Image: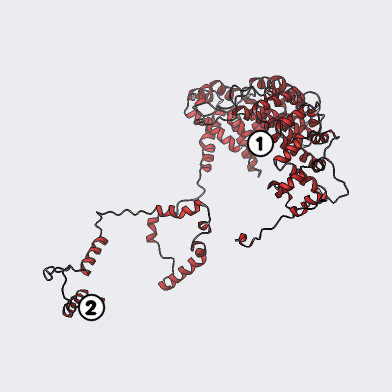
């Protein structure tokens, strides 16, 4: 009840604004200046929106502070200035977006020589990004007049804030027609081609990384927005360029031709993986009944551009640089391009690359399910040319030898076990059971004998160990056996002592936690208030009128024993008839009442 005593305090900012000589720095020193600005303090907003204040705020976020200032306070005012300019107050947005001189001051920040101060770059990007979202037409019109805008942004792409600025231009422009104009403008400026060129080996690694990440984000944003828009909307020109065969070929040329660098290959591969991403459609109920992957279809032009460079990727997989990230590309390249034997070579060569093992197991061996019907030629290649059975046996024997000598078990043995079981399952049953059986019979006698011994002994024992229960259930018993168990209390301990110990145990263990009500039951939220009544609603108040249990019979007997019926023969008089009261009648009635109750009730 603070209002009763009128304890509301006036903000110190209002007191400062009463002074005619108050400065912007004095107001920014106040801790609650941001709070008052977002609370729409009219006097404060009118002061901040003055020309000299707005100019000072913009200069603070675009000018390097003096180096002799203490580090912890050096960027204090630029940070507060950025928060004020992006506080999403219409008066400030209108002033900043409608004054071209202020926009020119902001734009001049991009004309500096690289590298930009990363903190100031983030202030600049946040301020421009807020204007793009709030004052879209004015800001876009201003930026399109600047011929070198995209070039300046890409010149400073080593600062991640510039990457965020480009993404805001693509994702934060509304309405849809204006957004399409912006996309066409960015396409005319050849944004995608210029970003692709930045992945070249001769560029700075930070610039390569940010350019690659920008391309990946553009792909995902464009695809997401394309899925949300109506069919009659014009296609995204940036996405069309990214998915074109010419653009993908240019990216691959940057990666593999001329001087190769680890950074350019890694960043270029990341863009390719994003282009090859597939996203499962919503509402997919049955994976096998509707196809292996019902999702975004990869543009065939991307695949055609990659195909001539498959040998380059294979060489990277066989002889990777120090950072072995390229094996991830194996999961996205179409399996018809990479030979089965080549994938198995990778499987056995890199015994600790678990991601590679999973992908080879996924599509590099005999699959199970409805797709097995078309795998007869593939099976023949696996057993004859790739020598799948022989390689399983050799790898297993080599691993046993390593372990016998005290070495560690190889990392691909789990996947190898599953592949061996897959061969056995298809040999025992399946659409191509007879074909696989014939292929096994074609093996040499020695190899066939080794395989049969492996399946009957080694693989069977491995499967048995893999299915052993981690917790033994032999000593478990049902609750019905509890009655036959001996009491946990010693025989010489009295029942009273046992009960006292039980009380102490309950009190010390969880009495405090269980006693009374929870604090949540007294909160002001409706769901907590109704929780108690919800529990009352669970109580069953239904009574069975026909229930003639022993308790009901005992209750009836007790009632009959305690209450006797009035003797109508003894009192035939009308009880409502007015009559003279005499003491003899009252004594007689009391005597009868005492006799009825019996001496035990007195």
CB under 8 Å between discs 1 and 2: no
Position of residue 495 measured from the top left corner of the image (x, y, whole percent): 40, 72
Q: Pick the residue in front: 278 or 476.
A: 278
Q: Which mark is residue 432?
A: none
Q: Residues within 10 Å of mark 1 (few under 14, many from 20)?
A: some
Decide if residue 196 is in sight here: yes
Residue nearest the observer in this picture, 306 or 188: 188
- Which comes sooner in the sequence, label 1 or label 2? 1
- 224 relative to 286 in the view: left or right: right
Number of numbered labels in the structure image: 2
Q: Which residue is mark 2?
A: 599
* Image: 79 above or below 15: above
* Callout 1 secondary element: loop
Secondary structure under tag 2 reads helix
Horizontal arrangement in the rendering, residue 163 relative to residue 330 (left or right):
right
- Residue occupying image coordinates x 59% and y 35%: 416
User: Which residue is labeled 1 in the image?
Assistant: 353
Quadrant position of residue 576: bottom left
x and y percentages locating residue 395 in the rendered image: 62, 34
Quadrant hosting residue 590: bottom left
162 or 405, nearer to the observer? 162
Q: Which image quarter is the C terminus in?
A: bottom left
User: Disc 1 versus disc 2: distance between alpha carbons?
Assistant: 95 Å
Q: Check the picture and name the quadrant holding the N terminus.
A: bottom right
**Picture coordinates of residue 384 (x, y %)?**
59, 23
Is residue 363 left or right of 552 when viewed as pictured?
right
**Residue 270 visible here:** no
Q: Residue furthest right?
A: 68
């Amino acid at each position: 009840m603070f209002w009763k005593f009128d304890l509301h305090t006036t903000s110190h900012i209002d007191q400062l604004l009463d002074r005619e000589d108050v400065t912007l720095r004095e107001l920014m020193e106040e801790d609650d200046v941001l709070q008052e600005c977002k609370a729409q303090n009219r006097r404060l907003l009118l002061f901040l929106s003055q020309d000299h204040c707005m100019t000072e705020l913009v200069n603070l976020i675009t000018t390097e502070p003096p180096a002799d200032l203490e580090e912890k306070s050096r960027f204090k005012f630029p940070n507060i200035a950025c928060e004020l300019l992006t506080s999403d107050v219409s008066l400030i947005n209108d002033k900043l977006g409608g004054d071209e001189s202020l926009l020119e001051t902001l734009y001049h920040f991009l004309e500096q020589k690289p590298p930009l101060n990363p903190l100031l770059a983030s202030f600049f990007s946040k301020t421009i990004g807020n204007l793009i979202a709030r004052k879209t037409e004015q800001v876009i019109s201003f930026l399109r007049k600047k011929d070198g805008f995209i070039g300046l942004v890409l010149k400073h792409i080593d600062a991640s804030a510039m990457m965020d600025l480009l993404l805001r231009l693509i994702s934060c422009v509304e309405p849809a027609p204006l957004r399409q104009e912006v996309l066409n403008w960015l396409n005319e400026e050849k944004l995608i081609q210029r970003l692709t060129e930045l992945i070249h080996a001769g560029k700075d690694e930070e610039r390569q990384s940010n350019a690659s990440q920008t391309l990946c984000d553009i792909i995902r944003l464009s695809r997401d927005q394309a899925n949300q828009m109506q069919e009659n909307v014009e296609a995204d020109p940036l996405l069309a360029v990214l998915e074109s065969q010419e653009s993908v070929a240019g990216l691959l040329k940057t990666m593999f031709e001329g001087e190769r660098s680890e950074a350019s290959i890694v960043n270029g591969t990341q863009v390719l993986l994003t282009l090859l991403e597939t996203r499962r459609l919503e509402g997919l109920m049955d994976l096998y009944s509707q196809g292996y992957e019902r999702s975004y279809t990869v543009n065939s032009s991307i695949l055609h551009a990659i195909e001539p460079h498959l040998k380059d990727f294979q060489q990277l997989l066989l002889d990777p640089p120090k950072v072995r990230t390229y094996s991830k590309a194996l999961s996205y390249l179409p399996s018809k391009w990479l030979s089965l034997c080549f994938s198995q070579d990778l499987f056995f060569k890199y015994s600790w690359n678990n991601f590679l093992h999973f992908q080879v197991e996924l599509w590099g061996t005999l699959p199970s399910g409805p797709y097995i019907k078309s795998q007869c030629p593939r099976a023949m290649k696996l057993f004859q040319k790739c020598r799948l059975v022989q390689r399983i046996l050799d790898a297993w024997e080599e691993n046993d030898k390593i372990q016998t000598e005290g070495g560690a078990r190889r990392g691909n043995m789990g996947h190898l076990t599953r592949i061996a079981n897959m061969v056995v399952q298809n040999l025992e049953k399946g659409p191509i059971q007879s074909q696989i059986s014939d292929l096994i019979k074609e093996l040499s006698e020695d190899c066939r004998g080794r395989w049969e011994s492996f399946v009957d002994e080694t693989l069977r024992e491995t499967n048995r160990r893999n299915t052993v229960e981690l917790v033994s259930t032999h000593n478990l018993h049902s609750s019905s056996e509890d009655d036959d168990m001996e009491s946990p209390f010693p025989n010489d301990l009295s029942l009273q002592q046992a009960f006292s110990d039980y009380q102490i145990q309950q009190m010390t263990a969880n009495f405090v936690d269980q006693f009374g009500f929870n604090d949540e039951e007294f909160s002001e939220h409706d769901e907590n208030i109704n929780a108690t009544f919800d529990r009352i609603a669970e109580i069953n108040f239904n009574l069975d009128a026909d229930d003639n249990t022993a308790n009901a019979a005992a209750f009836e007997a007790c009632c009959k024993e305690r209450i006797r019926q009035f003797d109508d023969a003894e009192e035939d008089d009308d009880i409502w008839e007015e009559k003279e009261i005499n003491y003899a009648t009252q004594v007689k009635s009391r005597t009868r009442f005492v006799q009825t109750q019996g001496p035990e009730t007195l």
